Every structure is written in C-alpha cells, then in structure tokens.
Image (cartoon, helix red, strand yellow):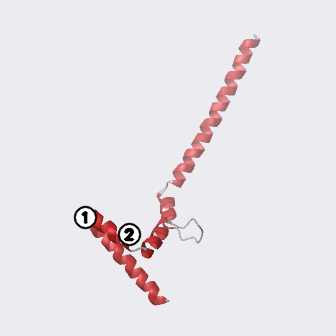
Amino acid sequence: MSSASDRAVRKALLQAQAEIERIELAQRVGDVRAALSPKNLVQRLVSTGGSARDGLFQRLSGQLTSHPGLLSGAAFLLGKGRARRIVKVITAVLALRKALQLMRR
C-alpha cells in the first residue's frame, strides 16, 4: 500500500513540476515575442540614447560619415542594379548630412 501511495505522490509532484515548467516556458515565449515585436525592433535600430547601446543606424551612420570610402567601395562591388543605386543614394544623403553638420559649426 505504501508503494502505491509513494507512486501517487511522485506522480503528483511530477505533474506539478511539469505545470511549473509549462508556465515558465509560456512566460519566456511571451518575453521573446515582446522583444521581437516590430515596435521594439525599430526602437533598437533607431534608438538615440547617449549610452553605449546607441542604435544600429546611428552607429553605422557615424562610421560611414567618418569613412565615406566604405559606401563608395560597396557601390563599386555591387556592380549594376538596384542595390548599387540605393547605396549611391545613401552615400549622397550621408554626404549632405555631414556637409550640413559642418556648416552649423
């Protein structure tokens, strides 16, 4: 009789543990969904905070304005096509932005 009650207790403990794991998994999935929402992704890319976690666009823009040859080289390597035109437009926009910044100083 004691072995039957031990099995019942063990089964109840395993069921409770499985339920806790399901709840934790559901919470983690919710966290991942929130982190990967379009709003949060855009916020990470465009973030303008002054900390080390600046947005990707801001950091990339800083590098490309410091080294304009990177975009020119990328345009050359892309050859003909739509991607090359897009890179050329981005290069022009960044050059204009840098010129405006220099004029403000």
The residue at which mark 1 appears reads as 79
Residue at 33 percent of width and 71 percent of height: 72
- Relative to residue 95, is residue 36 depicted above or below? above
In x, y percent, where is residue 58? 48, 70
In x, y percent, where is residue 23? 62, 39
In x, y percent, where is residue 32? 54, 49
Residue at 35 percent of width and 72 percent of height: 90
- Relative to residue 60, is residue 2 depicted above or below? above
Residue at 49 percent of width and 59 percent of height: 41
**Residue 89 image-quadrant placement:** bottom left
Q: In this view, does 62 lie to the left or right of 9?
A: left
Using the numbered discs, state the Cα–Cα distance from disc 1 to disc 2 in whole angstroms: 15 Å
**Residue 99 image-quadrant placement:** bottom left
At mark 2, the secondary structure is: helix
Q: Residue furthest right?
A: 2
At mark 1, the secondary structure is: loop
**Residue 103 image-quadrant placement:** bottom left
Residue at 23 percent of width and 64 percent of height: 81
Task: Check disc 2 and give the amino acid type.
Answer: Leu
Q: Residues within 10 Å of mark 1 (few under 14, many from 20)?
A: few
Task: Check disc 1 and give the amino acid type.
Answer: Gly
Q: In which quarter of the image is the N terminus?
A: top right
The residue at which mark 2 appears reads as 70
